[in-house]
Image (spheres, grey):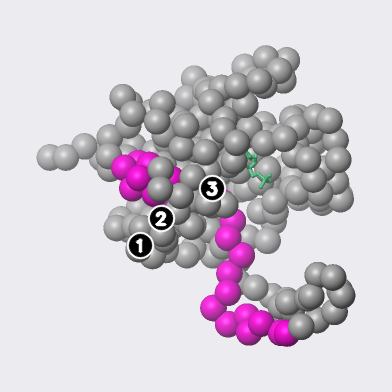
Amino acid sequence: MPNTPRIFAIIPAAGQGTRMGDALPKQYLPLAGRPMMFHSLEALAAVGRIDHVIAVLSPLDRHWGAHDWSAFPEKIEALFAGGATRGRSVANALELLETRAQPDDWVLVHDAARPCIAKALVEQFLDEIDDDPVGGLLAMPLADTLKRAEPALMRVAETIPRDGLWRAQTPQMFRYAVLRRALERLPDATDEAQAVEALGQMPRVVQGENANIKVTFAEDLPIAEMILARKGGVPL
Ligand code: C5P
């Protein structure tokens, strides 16, 4: 009988976070008393079905060693293998997993910059993707009306119909061999699904949650703190 595929979780955390306007890389910014990426690591490590949680850090990272990660079980590790783009960081990690991962093992990728992910949402996502031939991603249907503006004029050029449009979130999950091939071909894809789509496959869309925000700008930090406080049962 074939072995049950294992799940390797990868957290790309090798970005510089320049849009934050802060010298400290975004993944280490203090959030609810912890470095931001602590929250993603914590949520993924708490999922029993995930076998390994791997943070991909910049080879020049000087911050990891300054924090206390001892709260985590042994399934967490750091790889100082980040690349020039998010896709390259994930691709480097996949290369280093070559001797450990089987072609059919699952690779779940989740941004360090999405610290509000709920363990229950990850579990629901795993349930939905479990037997999917391609894999998939969390995403939200577009709620706002979508405009394309002329950048120089800051005037609306057209309204884009939003039917069938989704905002991609993470986690995203694909088979090890497929994702490796996809990112070798398209290392600058802005998410894993885009690279898999370029192979001609159609990733499955699983509805996420608005609370799973991506922290990009400084103004996102207090919103993420509020969401985390509510998750922890702390009154706002
Ligand atoms: O910058 P952005 O928010 O799009 O980055 C998404 C995620 O990818 C972040 O967790 C960031 O640390 C990571 N990243 C990376 N390697 C890069 C650029 C971004 O691991 N070269």
As displayed, is residue 73 above or below residue 184? above
Q: Could you tell me residue 206's position as x and y percent?
A: 49, 63
Q: Could you tell me residue 31's position as x and y percent?
A: 79, 36
Question: Whole-Å distance between the Cαs marked 3 and 1?
Answer: 18 Å
* Left or right position of 160 against 234: left
Q: Residue at x 62, y 80 (%)?
A: 162
Name, please, the residue furthest toward the left: 1
Residue 146 part of the magenta segment: no
Question: Whole-Å distance between the Cαs marked 2 and 1?
Answer: 6 Å
Amino acid found under the numbered disc labelled 3:
Asp
Residue linked to disc 3: 188
Q: Are marks 2 and 1 in contact (CB under 8 Å)?
A: yes
Q: Residues within 10 Å of mark 1 (few under 14, many from 20)?
A: some
Q: Residues within 10 Å of mark 3 (few under 14, many from 20)?
A: some
Pair 2/3: label in front: 3
Tell me which corner region of the image, top left, top right, bottom left or bottom right, holds residue 97.
top left
Q: Which of pointers 2 and 3 lies earlier in the amino acid sequence?
A: 3
Secondary structure under tag 2 reads helix
Secondary structure under tag 3 reads loop
The front one of 195 and 99 is 195
Q: What segment is highlighted magenta in the picture?
A: 158-183
Q: Residue at x 41, y 26 (%)?
A: 96
Amino acid found under the numbered disc labelled 1:
Gln
Quadrant placement of the N terminus = top left
* Left or right position of 226 against 133: right
Residue linked to disc 1: 201
Residue linked to disc 2: 196
Tell me which corner region of the image, top left, top right, bottom left or bottom right, holds residue 154.
bottom right
Amino acid found under the numbered disc labelled 2:
Val
Q: Residue at x 46, y 37 (%)?
A: 91
Q: Residue at x 75, y 39 (%)?
A: 17
